[in-house]
């Protein structure tokens, strides 16, 4: 007898779990950097437009596929069309590649949280702290394992008693903390040695107000592609997560309302993350500090900002890295669940056995990623021209190549093979009104595939169309 599939107990649990997956390092870390790099307000405007069109299309599609098939990504696509099951294999490879290095970064965050809790913020603000930490042998591995244990314990507990309960507790706390730090950042002022005074409000104006005065077509298209790439991180699509979470929703759940609420919640948190970081970094570092991305922003620039605040910086730094820890764990839980669910559906393994196997492989690959900064260090030139090592290669293949491929093939499957009616019927099965029906059809058949093709071509470095 086939075991009954786990479900979220209600619509709120599903929304908070899906939002928790979406609100991860992509929102807290990557979104503010891109917003700063791409001129603030223009990027924000383009992102919001894409979120309600392109993002909504992919989010609604994946959640609908999950609920319709009641399967995880590895087996769901074959249920839609037996000839297109290969998409599920690629979709499952994505979280398999992301999880080890994501948990390595999660370990870095735990290290910084511990540093601030122990009142060692000034050490974290030095230029030597972050390189010294990641190039050491034992400590990054220890924090990786700690982060993985935190993640695995939630997934091991199950859907309703683990993921849903965890999200219901953590997401409201996360939102309150983000709002608190965001408001505080607006009123920060800093005076340079030459008497120059900068305020958080000035940084906020740069962040929120679009400036098209020097905009060219090429620059606009660069911003468009950056915002498009960010959406994959922000709404957790093309990595099997939303299909998995969709498979845990009941037929009575109002999918249309749920998708809209996840979309709104995620966009608000992404905007608040920018509001939390950009005004503070601008006040202390100006536009140059705003443009620093990747590890430089979170692990170098922000600790310097916190250190400049004096005693207050200890509190703000601790709360900030607590926020990032919460966001990282909610996302890593969803990544691990996508893999565990796929193993359970494909091989009929128990949750316990699947969790142990995923945990073991994540530790092994995670250790290799950690050692990529010392024992296994090498430099490899990506097709985009960037120099990379192990973590960067994992990130490039999963995020820049496989995720656009999964999204593109999903659009072709639903738009042209199974037809948009497959998703539309699932979204409206309880009589829900679909106000963006025609927009959805146009996006899934024409616009989304075209944008994804351009994004993929850029990542392959074949040529830059702009």
Image (spheres, rainbow, N blue to C red):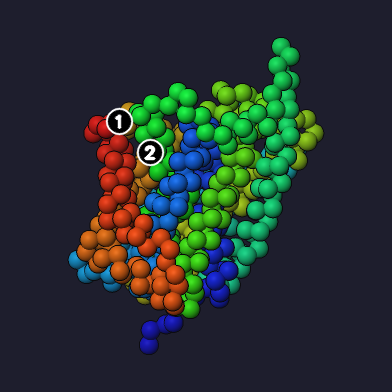
- Please tell me how crowded label 1 is: few (under 14), some (14-19), or many (20+) other residues with Cα within 10 Å: few
| Residue 224 placement, left or right of 183 | left
- Please tell me how crowded label 2 is: few (under 14), some (14-19), or many (20+) other residues with Cα within 10 Å: some
- Which residue is found at the position 57% from the left and 63% from the top? 16
- Which residue is found at the position 31% from the left and 38% from the top? 459
| Residue 377 placement, left or right of 106 | left
- Which residue is found at the position 24% from the left and 31% from the top? 463
| Residue 107 placement, left or right of 434 | right
Q: Is residue 360 visible?
A: no
Q: Residue furthest right?
A: 311
Percent of width and height locating residue 130: 58, 32
Tag 2 and tag 1, C-beta contact below 8 Å: yes
Q: Which residue is mark 1?
A: 466
Question: Can you tell which quarter of the image residue 300 is in?
Answer: top right
Percent of width and height locating residue 297: 56, 32
Q: Nearer the viewer, residue 224 or 348?
A: 224
Q: Secondary structure at mark 1?
A: loop
- Which residue is found at the position 41% from the left and 52% from the top? 53
**Separation of residues labelled 2 and 1 (CA atoms):** 10 Å
Q: Nearer the viewer, residue 444 or 28?
A: 444
Q: How many marks?
A: 2
Percent of width and height locating residue 237: 41, 55
Q: Secondary structure at mark 2?
A: helix
Q: Which mark is residue 225?
A: 2
Q: Residue furthest left?
A: 83
Q: Which mark is residue 230?
A: none
Percent of width and height locating residue 40: 53, 33
Where 297 falls versus 81 (above or below)? above
């Amino acid at each position: 007898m086939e075991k009954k599939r786990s479900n979220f107990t209600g619509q709120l649990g599903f929304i908070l779990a899906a939002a928790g997956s979406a609100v991860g390092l992509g929102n807290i870390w990557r979104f503010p950097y891109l917003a700063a790099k791409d001129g603030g307000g223009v990027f924000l405007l383009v992102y919001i437009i894409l979120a309600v069109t392109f993002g909504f299309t992919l989010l609604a599609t994946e959640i609908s596929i999950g609920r319709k098939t009641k399967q995880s990504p590895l087996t769901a696509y074959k249920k839609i069309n037996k000839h297109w099951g290969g998409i599920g294999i690629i979709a499952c490879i994505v979280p398999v590649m992301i999880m080890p290095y994501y948990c390595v970064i999660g370990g870095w965050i735990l290290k910084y949280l511990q540093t601030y809790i122990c009142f060692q913020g000034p050490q974290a603000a030095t230029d030597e702290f972050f390189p010294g930490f990641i190039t050491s042998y034992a400590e990054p591995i220890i924090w990786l394992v700690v982060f993985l244990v935190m993640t695995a314990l939630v997934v091991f507990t199950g859907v309703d008693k683990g993921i849903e309960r965890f999200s219901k507790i953590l997401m409201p706390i996360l939102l309150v903390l983000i709002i608190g730090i965001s408001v505080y950042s607006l009123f920060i002022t800093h005076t340079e040695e030459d008497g120059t005074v900068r305020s958080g409000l000035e940084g906020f104006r740069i962040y929120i107000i679009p400036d098209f005065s020097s905009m060219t077509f090429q620059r606009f298209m660069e911003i468009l592609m950056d915002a498009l790439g960010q959406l994959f991180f922000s709404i957790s699509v093309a990595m099997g997560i939303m299909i998995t979470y969709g498979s845990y929703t009941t037929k009575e759940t109002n999918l249309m309302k749920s998708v809209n609420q996840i979309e709104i919640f995620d966009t608000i948190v992404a905007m608040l993350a920018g509001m939390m970081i950009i005004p503070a970094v601008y006040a202390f570092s100006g536009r140059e500090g705003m443009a620093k991305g990747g590890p430089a922003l979170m692990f170098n620039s922000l600790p310097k900002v916190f250190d400049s605040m004096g005693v207050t910086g200890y509190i703000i730094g601790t709360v900030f890295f607590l926020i990032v820890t919460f966001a990282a764990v909610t996302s890593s839980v969803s990544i691990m669940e996508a893999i565990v669910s796929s193993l359970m559906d494909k091989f009929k393994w128990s949750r316990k056995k699947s969790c142990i196997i995923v945990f073991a492989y994540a530790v092994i690959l995670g250790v290799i990623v950690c050692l990529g900064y010392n024992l296994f260090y090498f430099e490899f030139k990506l097709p985009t021209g960037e120099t990379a090592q192990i973590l960067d290669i994992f990130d490039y293949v999963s995020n820049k190549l496989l995720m656009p491929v999964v999204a593109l093939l999903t659009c072709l499957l639903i738009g042209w093979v199974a037809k948009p009616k497959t998703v539309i019927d699932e979204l409206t099965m309880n009589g829900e009104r679909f106000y963006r029906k025609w927009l959805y059809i146009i996006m899934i058949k024409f616009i989304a595939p075209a944008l994804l093709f351009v994004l993929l071509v850029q990542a392959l470095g074949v040529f830059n169309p702009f």
